[in-house]
Amino acid sequence: MRAPLLIRLTLPALCTLGLCMFAGCTTQRTGPYTTQTDAARNPLEAQRLTQEAVTVFDTDPEKAELLLRDALTADLFHGPAHNNLGVLYLHRGDLYRAASEFEWARKTLPGLPDPRLNLALTLERAGRIDDAIEEYRSALEVYPGHIQTLQAMTRCRLRHQPEDAREDPTVTSDLREISLRGEGAEWPAWARAQLARLESRTD
């Protein structure tokens, strides 16, 4: 079973994890993270640079990183640039910096589930399972029924907390949902197999 996608908001899967990446999107300032003034910010330039980074993300990640850093120089509160930079760090295995960037994206894009999902996947990879599950649930609060989050959280619970998950009726409900509308062919097949195992335990 392949791991869930780390989400790039404008592009699909990357490697064995999928990231939500953003090419554009407007952002909003939600807290005093820096002394950069509103007058010093250039959101349009940040968006342009982020879009350019997306086009070379897979072919030239070093250039993509430079472009994303330039985007954040233009506007430190440009959430898509933070999110995509987090994707780069996570692919390199730099979990600390990835988590930091996803935290920024989470704060500057409060209405979107994707940075929360990416942060949850990072926490899960770091072995912080309880924190990861809490972040998955946070993504589902922002976007109830978000299928990528539902898939990732259910898989995480069955993998790392199997006994608790098997006793939780919401896991069965989530598996049924994934079996009906999971991504591609693999996720529905995986969900049906998990349901069959759960049912066999109750016979």
Image (spheres, rainbow, N blue to C red):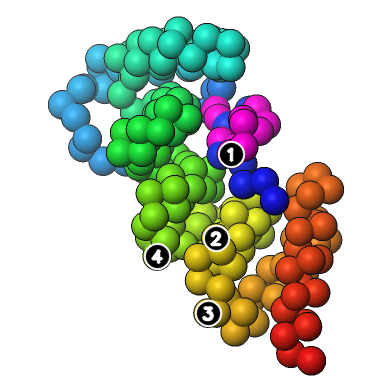
Label 4 sits on residue: 130
- Residue 21, position as x, y percentages in the image: 55, 30
User: Is residue 119 at least partly visible in the picture?
Assistant: no
Label 2 sits on residue: 156
Residue 164, label in figure: 3
- Residue 102, position as x, y percentages in the image: 39, 39
Label 1 sits on residue: 17
Q: Nearer the viewer, residue 35 or 193?
A: 193
Residue type (three-letter) at the residue carrying disc 2: Cys
- Between discs 3 and 1, the one toward the N terminus: 1
From which residue to which does the magenta span run? 11-22
Q: Residues within 10 Å of mark 3 (few under 14, many from 20)?
A: few
- Between discs 4 and 3, the one toward the N terminus: 4
Quarter of the image with the C terminus in it: bottom right
Q: CA distance from mark 4 to mark 3?
A: 12 Å
Q: Secondary structure at mark 1?
A: loop
